[in-house]
Image: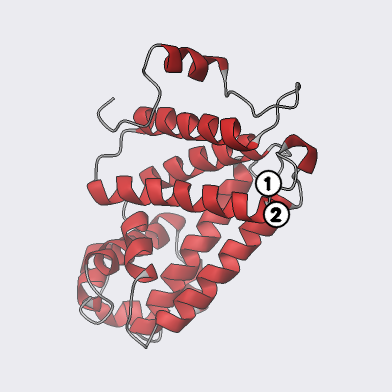
Amino acid sequence: MNEKFFSLPEEKQQKIINAGFRVFGMNSYKKSPVSEIAAEAGISKSLLFHYFQNKKELYLFLWEECARITIEYLTRYGCYESTDLFDMMYRGMKAKMYLMKRYPAMGTFVIKAYYEKDPAVCQEVQASYQKFLNFKALKAIKKLDPEQFLPGLDLEMMYRQMYLASEGYLLEIVRSGDIDVDRMEQDFIRMMDFWKSVYVVSKDGNPSAGSEETIIQRKEGRYGCNSNQ
C-alpha cells in the first residue's frame, strides 16, 4: 500500500474507506467494481490504484482497518481498562454503536467479508478474524475473577458464548437497517442481566438474580429482548 494514502487528510481517508465498505458490503469480492468505489470517494480509479496496488490489497486493507478501528475505539471507551466483565461489555457496546454512526457501512462489509468464499481473499480474512478474536478474548479473560462466577465454570467458553451472541445481535441490527440506539442499549442491558442471572454468584452463594430493574421487569412480565419494544 502506498504511504501517500496516510498523508491524505483524515476526512479524505474516511471517504475512501466508507466508499470501500459500502461497495464491498453490497457485492461479492469478485463483483465489486473498484471504479464505483473511486467514484463514490470522489477520485479517479487510477488515483485509487496509486494508493493501493490492486483490488485485493484494498479489500484486505479495509478488512484489517475494521479490526484496527474497533480496537482503537474499544480502547478509547475504556473497555480494556475495566476489571468487570459486564462493564467491559457495556463499554464495548457503546463503542460499537458509535462506530455504526461514523462508519455506517462497516457492519455490512464485515458480514460480507466474513462469509466471502473467493480464494483470493478468504484465507487471509479468516486468519485475521481468528487473530482478532483471540486478542479480544485474552484481554478479557485474564482480568476475570473466577470467584465471581459459578464454581468450575469454563470462563473462556462463557466469554466466547457472550461475545458471539453480542456480535450476532449487532449484525442482525445491521442487516435490518433499523438502527435504534436507545432500543439497542436497552436490549443489551437485558442480555447482560440474563447472563448475570446464569453465570454470576451472588453474595449468598446462589446465582445472581440480575439487576433490580430486571427483577421488576420480570414481575411485570416485561423481561426479554423484544424488537418491537
Badge 1, how many Cα within 10 Å: few under 14, some, many 20+?
many
The residue that label 1 is drawn on is: 80
Task: Report if residue 1 is visible in the image.
Answer: no
Q: Observer-nearest residue: 162 or 66? A: 162
Left or right position of 180 against 210: left
The picture quadrant where one finds residue 183 is top left
Left or right position of 67 against 115: right
The picture quadrant where one finds residue 56 is bottom left
The answer to whether mark 1 and mark 2 are in CB contact below 8 A is yes
- Residue 28 horizontal/vertical position (percent): 25, 75
Q: Residue at x 32, y 49 (%)?
A: 172
State the CA–CA distance, disc 1 to disc 2.
7 Å
In the displayed structure, 202 sits above or below 159; it is: above
Label 1 SS: loop
The residue that label 2 is drawn on is: 139
Of mark 1 and mark 2, the one earlier in the sequence is 1
Q: Amino acid at mark 1?
A: Tyr
Label 2 SS: helix
The C terminus, quarter of image? top left
Q: Residue at x 49, y 69 (%)?
A: 64
